[in-house]
Image: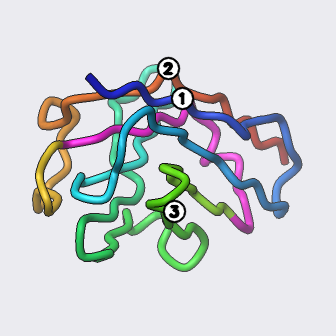
Amino acid sequence: QVQLAESGGGSVQAGVSLRLSCASSRSIVTYCMTWFRQAPGKEREAVASTDRYLTTNYAESVKGRFTISKDNIKKILWLEMTSLKPEDTAMYYCAARTTWTCPAVSRPDLYNYWGQGTQVTVSS
């Protein structure tokens, strides 16, 4: 079992930055790790992912603004979010898939472990 715990969310003004953290109870070196988000009334969508080889992928809507990274020793996954927009408002979740690489399309059902989420609210 892997337990994931997100933190770092909050209510901010548009244009500012936030850094989300996801602490894992176990090593994340060999896992595909992905940040998802879900806004009210919308489906959960993958935002950014990274894998065993540190390959990263981003949703088009966040490219150039968000950066995913991880510290394998500390077992922490981060999501650095800059130039936040109201449309970034959502509950953000980290998820782990027990494979070395991430799927081409990161569907939520492909992930084994989830955190409880952290809310990000961006006002204009």
In the image: residue 36, left or right of residue 92: left
The stretch in magenta equals 82-97
Q: Amino acid at mark 2?
A: Gln
Q: Which residue is mark 3?
A: 71
Sort mark 2 into few (<14), some (14-19) or many (20+) by Cα contacts within 10 Å: some
Q: Position of residue 114 (x, y in %)?
A: 36, 27
Sort mark 3 into few (<14), some (14-19) or many (20+) by Cα contacts within 10 Å: few
Mark 2 and mark 1 in contact (Cβ < 8 Å)?
A: yes
Mark 2 and mark 3 in contact (Cβ < 8 Å)?
A: no
Q: Is residue 22 above or below residue 65?
A: above
Q: Which residue is mark 2?
A: 116
Q: Which residue is mark 1?
A: 5
Is label 1 or label 2 in front? 1
Q: Residue at x 84, y 61 (%)?
A: 16
Which numbered disc flags the more N-terminal residue, 3 or 2? 3
Is label 3 or label 2 in front? 3
Q: Is residue 98 above or below residue 105?
A: above
- Which SS class for mark 3? strand
Which numbered disc flags the more N-terminal residue, 1 or 3? 1
Q: Amino acid at mark 1?
A: Ala
Q: Residue at x 64, y 39 (%)?
A: 89
Is label 1 or label 3 in front? 3
Let me know if residue 83 is in the magenta part.
yes
